[in-house]
Every structure is written in C-alpha cells, then in structure tokens.
Image: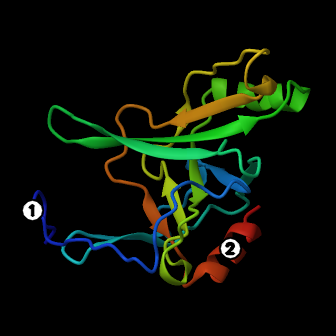
Amino acid sequence: MAVCGLLNTGVSFDCDNKSTGGLEQARIYLGNKSDIDYNTSVVNRDSATGSHNISNLALVTGAKLYSFAGITNKRLLNASYSFQEGDFLNTLQHSVDIGVYDQSEASLALLNQFLTGAEVFAIVEQKSKGVENTSAFQIYGFHTGLTVGDIPYNANENNGIIILPLTSPDPFEPYPPYKFEETDYATTITKIDGLL
C-alpha cells in the first residue's frame, strides 16, 4: 500500500558527487504525448520503497522523438516544476523551455503546430547525472503533457531567438518529473537515439 502524506525517507549530501545544476545544452527531446504507449511503458512509482522512475518508455509504432538543440554555455534550454495547491489534490506544473532560432518558414510552421494544440512530453538531460550517470535523464509532462505557454517574441530581444515555454496544462501533473533510465546511461542514450 502506498504511503501518502507521510515522510518515509531522508536525503544526505554526497561531497564526492556535488550537484552543478542546469541541463546539458546539447538538446532536449520532445515527443507527442498521444504517442506514448501507456500499456507497455514501465512506470515504477512506490512511495514505500522510494521508486519514482520510468524504466521503459514505449511509443506507438511509427512514433518518434524530435531533437531541439541548445547553444553551448548559454543555458537556453531549461526545465522546472512548481507546486500547485488544489482544492482536493496538490499537483506540479512542469515547464520546459526550448529555443526557436530564426523566423524561417519551418520555424513558423513549428510554432503553428504548438498554437493548434500540440501536446508533448520532454526528455531532458541533467548536467549532474549522479553516481555512474544513474540520474542523467528526466521525463516532464508524462501524464498531462506540455503545451505552449506565452510566446514572447520581440525581434530586438534575445538576438531574435524565440524562447518557447512549454508547460503543463490545468489539471497539472500529479507527480514530479520521472527519472528515466533503461538499464544504464548508454542503453538509455541508444534508446533515445533510436527513436529520433
């Protein structure tokens, strides 16, 4: 039985594996939420044992992930979550920021896909990956998806780059982002690359 509303574990500081914060700026991966095969994806969530991960992300046949690049050392790609107090249940709003780097036709078509209702999930790679890279990846928007937020484009700001915020719609996510690891770091990267 789940342990709800009771603390059953603690954390400690590991001075040999200090957190640096931030995301790897190489890329964030987005997939259509409707492409997640929830019947065969393996979600391990047990508050009694402290499990909170996805050990197998399955997509429907023919589905793929899409890569969104960052700019090295610029912290353009971002991920966060915030507490949302509810009338009956508390939730979290997940947020992921990606960059759209120009005003090309392809970029405008991408924006239109979000404006017309695209719901996605995101896989992000942490700079601090934990011991043996076991905490490298997290999945945002697994349950309720991420949709476009405010699009603050101004040609005279951010070097013309659109910083596109994707956020959980209301009702928000019932859980924090999931750790994502299929066996180990190398296997997880291979899985991700195979879905591109």
Q: Nearer the viewer, residue 187 or 24?
A: 24
* Secondary element at tag 1: loop
Identify the residue at the far right of this view.
Answer: 104
Location of residue 37 by image quarter: bottom right
Q: CA distance from mark 1 to mark 2?
A: 35 Å
Q: Reply above or below: 142 against 108.
A: below
Q: Amino acid at mark 2?
A: Ile
Q: Name the residue carrying label 2.
A: 189
Going by the numbered disc 1, the residue's amino acid type is Leu
Q: Quadrant of residue 53?
A: bottom left
At horizontal 50% and vertical 78% (from top left) the residue drawn is 134
74 displayed left or right of 101 = left
Compared with 11, 4 (above or below) is: above
Query: Looking at the rendering, which quadrant does residue 49 occupy?
Result: bottom left
Residue 39 seen by the camera? no
Locate the C terminus and report the quarter of the image it occupies: bottom right
Percent across and percent down for residue 106 are 87, 32
Please tell me which residue lies in front, 77 or 4.
Answer: 77
| Residue at 45% across, 70% down | 18
What is the crowding at mark 1: few (fewer than 14 residues within 10 Å), some, or many (at least 20)? few
SS state under label 2: helix
Taking the spot 22% from the left edge, 69% from the top edge, the residue there is 47
Would you name the residue on which mark 1 appears? 6
* Vertical relation: 78 (above or below) 100: below
User: Could you tell whether 111 is left or right of 56 in the image?
Assistant: right
Q: Position of residue 85 (x, y in %)?
A: 22, 35
